[in-house]
Amino acid sequence: MSNLDELMAQPGAIGAFKYGSKGELIESRIADDSELNDAILDLLCHVCVANISIATMQARGWENMTAMKGFYPVKGFSMLGFEWTVIANDEFGVVLPNNNADFEAVQAVLSGEGG
């Protein structure tokens, strides 16, 4: 499983966080030159839990209504903003600036396939 140090070692990472099932921030790492803080990361934790829950509901509903498979289980969540992107699984997340990020490398760390 990925950890915060592995996530922060990814190109462009400005913050990484671990969160609980109810969205509480458990642990974080923030780059020295970042404008992030734990209050922002705590909010992101709750956004990740909420969006993964909604996506899970939609994926299960879609599969049950259409008999199409492959949407469930939901393995993560990404939120693209104007300046940063947040990529998360059900336990860890990372914040990357859009202009300097390797999204595939981060996803590999989150899925346990690289690092």
Image: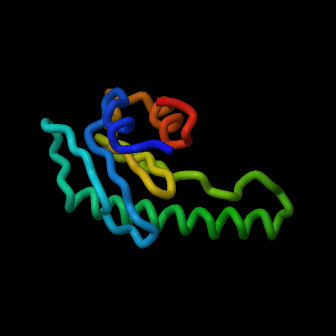
Left or right position of 67 against 53: right
Q: Which of 45 and 2 is in front in this view?
A: 2
- State the image coordinates of residue 77 (x, y, percent, origin top left): 50, 52
- State the image coordinates of residue 97 (x, y, percent, origin top left): 30, 36
Point 22% across, 44% down: residue: 30
Number of marks in the rendered image: 0
The outermost residue toward the right is 67
Which of the 4 quarters of the picture holds residue 38?
bottom left
Colouring: rainbow
Which of the 4 quarters of the picture holds residue 96?
top left
- State the image coordinates of residue 74 (x, y, percent, origin top left): 62, 56
Point 71% across, 67% down: residue: 60
21 up-or-down from 90: above or below: below
79 up-or-down from 83: above or below: below
Q: Which of 76 and 92 is in front in this view?
A: 92
Point 48% across, 36% down: residue: 109
Point 54% across, 52% down: residue: 76
Left or right position of 48 against 76: left
